[in-house]
C-alpha cells in the first residue's frame, strides 16, 4: 500500500476575490498508480474562499426564494497525500487525493431532476497561481426538494515534491467556478468570516 497522510478536514471559509489564473501544465489529474516510499510527503495548505463556496441558481425572474432553482454549498474537503509518479525529468511528485462534501438543495423554481456544477482547484506557489484544474459533476437532486449531503468523486492532482518532502510550498484554493453574476450575488448577499488558511500537518 502506498504511504499516505491524512489531508483535509473541516472547510475554513475565507474572504477572497477573483484571480487571473495562469495554467503552466505541470500539474495533472491522473490514474492512481503510485510509487511507494516509507513516508508520506507533506500535503499543501488549502483555502476555500467564502465568495466561491456557494452557488445560487435563479430562474431569471427574480432573486427571492420562489425563483430559486438550486443552491450548492461546499461544506467540507476530504482526502490525503501520498507518493505520486515521477515527472518527465524523473523528479518525485506528491499525489493529492481530494473529494468535496456538498450540501445540495432544489428550489421551488427547479424544473430538472439534475444540476450541473463546476468547481476548480487552483494551485498557488509563493503567492502566485501556477495552475488550475476544472472539474464538472452532474448531481441528481432529491425529489422532495429537501437538502441532501453528498460527496464528489475522488480527484487526483500531482505536484512537485521538492527537496524536502515533509514541507509543501503549495496552497490549494478550492471553490465553485461561478459566472460573474453568481460571484457578484455572493459578494452582495453573503457574509464571510475573517480570512484564514488551513495548514495541514
Image (tube, helix red, strand yellow):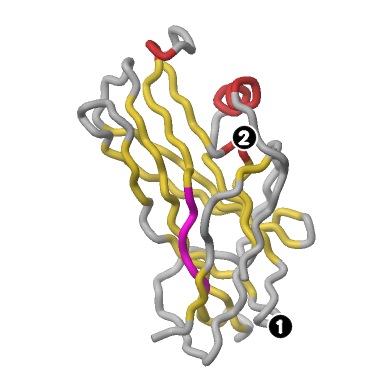
Mark 2 or 1 closer to N-term? 2
88 vs 26: above or below: below
Q: Is residue 196 left or right of residue 81?
A: right
Judging by the rendered image, the residue that carries numbered circle 2 is 51
Q: Nearer the viewer, residue 141 or 117?
A: 141
Residue 3, percent from left and from top: 47, 84
Assign the N terminus to one quadrant of the image.
bottom left
Q: What's the residue at 38%, 11% (across, down)? A: 66
Total numbered labels placed on residues in the image:
2
Q: Is residue 71 magenta?
A: no
6 vs 151: above or below: below
Q: What's the residue at 72%, 84% (across, down)? A: 163
Check whether the beta carbons of the residues at disc 2 and disc 1 lie within 8 A of each other: no
The residue positioned farthest toward the right in the image shown: 126
Q: Is residue 79 magenta?
A: yes
> Is disc 1 surrounded by few (<14), some (14 to 19) or many (20+) residues within 10 Å?
few
Label drawn at residue 37: none
Give the spatial CA distance, label 2 vs label 1: 33 Å
The residue positioned farthest toward the bottom in the image shown: 38
Which secondary structure, mark 1?
A: loop
Range shown magenta: 76-81
Snapshot quadrant of residue 128? bottom right
Snapshot quadrant of residue 113? top left
Residue 22, percent from left and from top: 69, 51
Residue 139, percent from left and from top: 31, 40
Judging by the rendered image, the residue that carries numbered circle 1 is 164
Q: Main secondary structure of the magenta part?
A: strand
Amino acid at each position: 500500500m502506498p504511504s499516505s497522510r491524512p489531508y483535509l478536514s473541516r472547510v475554513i471559509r475565507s474572504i477572497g476575490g477573483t484571480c487571473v489564473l495562469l495554467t503552466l501544465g505541470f500539474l495533472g489529474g491522473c490514474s492512481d498508480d503510485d510509487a511507494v516510499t516509507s513516508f508520506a510527503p507533506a500535503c499543501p495548505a488549502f483555502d476555500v474562499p467564502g465568495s466561491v463556496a456557494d452557488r445560487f441558481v435563479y430562474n431569471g425572474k427574480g432573486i427571492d426564494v420562489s425563483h430559486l432553482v438550486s443552491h450548492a454549498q461546499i461544506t467540507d474537503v476530504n482526502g490525503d497525500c501520498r507518493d505520486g509518479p515521477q515527472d518527465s525529468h524523473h523528479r518525485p511528485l506528491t499525489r493529492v487525493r481530494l473529494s468535496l462534501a456538498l450540501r445540495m438543495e432544489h428550489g421551488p423554481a427547479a424544473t430538472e431532476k439534475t444540476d450541473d456544477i463546476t468547481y476548480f482547484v487552483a494551485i498557488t506557489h509563493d503567492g502566485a497561481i501556477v495552475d488550475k484544474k476544472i472539474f464538472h459533476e452532474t448531481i441528481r437532486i432529491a425529489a422532495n426538494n429537501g437538502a441532501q449531503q453528498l460527496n464528489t468523486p475522488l480527484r487526483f492532482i500531482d505536484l512537485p515534491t521538492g527537496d524536502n518532502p515533509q514541507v509543501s510550498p503549495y496552497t490549494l484554493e478550492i471553490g465553485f467556478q461561478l459566472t460573474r453574476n453568481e460571484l457578484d450575488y455572493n459578494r452582495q448577499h453573503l457574509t464571510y468570516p475573517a480570512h484564514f488558511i488551513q495548514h495541514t500537518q
